[in-house]
Image (cartoon, helix red, strand yellow):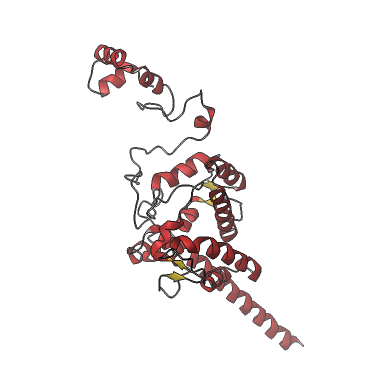
Amino acid sequence: MPSYAQVAAINGTSGDEGRSEKMEHGYDLVEKAIDQYPHGKPYSTSIVEVPITCERKPYIPQEHDALIDAGTARATIAPSKESPNGTTEGDWAKNHSHQTVVQQHAAYWDSDNDGIIWPQDTYRGCRNWGWNPVLAGLATFIINVNLSYPTCPGFMPDPFFRIYLARMHKDKHGSDSMSFDNEGRFIPCRFEDFFAKYDRGNKGGLDVWDLLRAHKGQRMAFDFFGWSASFLEWLATYLLLWPEDGVLRKEDVRRVFDGSIFQWKADEHLAKKRRSQYQRQGNGGLRSRLF
């Protein structure tokens, strides 16, 4: 851990000059900060006097991180430390460079690319994941009824509860990971913060207990809509990914944010359905030959 003199030297002053300047301007807080977390930095993100700051340590960029300018919002890609260029599989980032990340997040349901998501579009998209009609219908009701009006081009609500992609950023709410800004851009450091704070044990993802702590930790005062929306979004994410070990992997969650995983899950379900049909047909043919 560096001494105050070392920190002063880094800042271009001698130890005596630095200490004199500290006393003159009240820099005693800086000296205390370098004894806290992170070590070796002239600032502190955690102090023992406020235990919650030690429990939820934020993301701290390292010197050799591939993710650069983590605090700068990205308009068209959703990068992370592990994927600094966003989703490159299938040229996703390139093919969606005309959309903000929040528009990409919803583009899966706009199958005809007309910029409008009808309730039947939402229902069909959920069914393509293998969700049963009741669950798909409930998801459609929650999504279109609650998210339609903010995206409407005028003051009057849409009688068909359509969602307009051009104004998708209007559906931003509080009490979530805060990874989207008010214009629909993706903020990498907020995404990294979320996992740094709530991934206990550094599993590379979040289990149910992590998600419950995150839901409680991210809640804003009297934000009843945000509380509900965030809970339902993470519930839907868990149902979609349904991890065998119970851990939502960070990379999978990142691909939920940019929407690239939605069609992949639909294709996965379709392939599984076809294999099942093929096996049934094969078993039926075998029985007919035996009997």
Which residue is the extreme one toward the right? Answer: 291
Which residue is the extreme one toward the front? Answer: 155
* Residue 241: quadrant of the picture: bottom right
Residue at 57%, 66% (x, y): give it.
140
Q: Quadrant of the N terminus?
A: top left
Residue at 50%, 30% (x, y): give it.
54
Which residue is the extreme one toward the left? Answer: 12
Q: Is residue 291 left or right of residue 21?
A: right
Q: Is residue 149 left or right of residue 21?
A: right
Q: Is residue 211 above or below residue 99?
A: above
Residue at 51%, 26% (x, y): give it.
50
* Residue 282: quadrant of the picture: bottom right
Q: Is residue 234 above or below residue 144?
A: above
Residue at 34%, 55% (x, y): give it.
75
How many circles with numbers are drawn on the protein? 0
> Where does the image place residue 220, in percent across and percent down from the top left?
52, 42
Q: Foreground: 186 or 284?
A: 186
> Where does the image place residue 77, in percent across and percent down from the top left?
36, 56
> Where does the image place residue 72, in percent across and percent down from the top left?
33, 46
Q: Quadrant of the C terminus?
A: bottom right
> Where does the image place residue 141, in percent across and percent down from the top left?
58, 65
Q: Is residue 160 above or below residue 184?
A: below
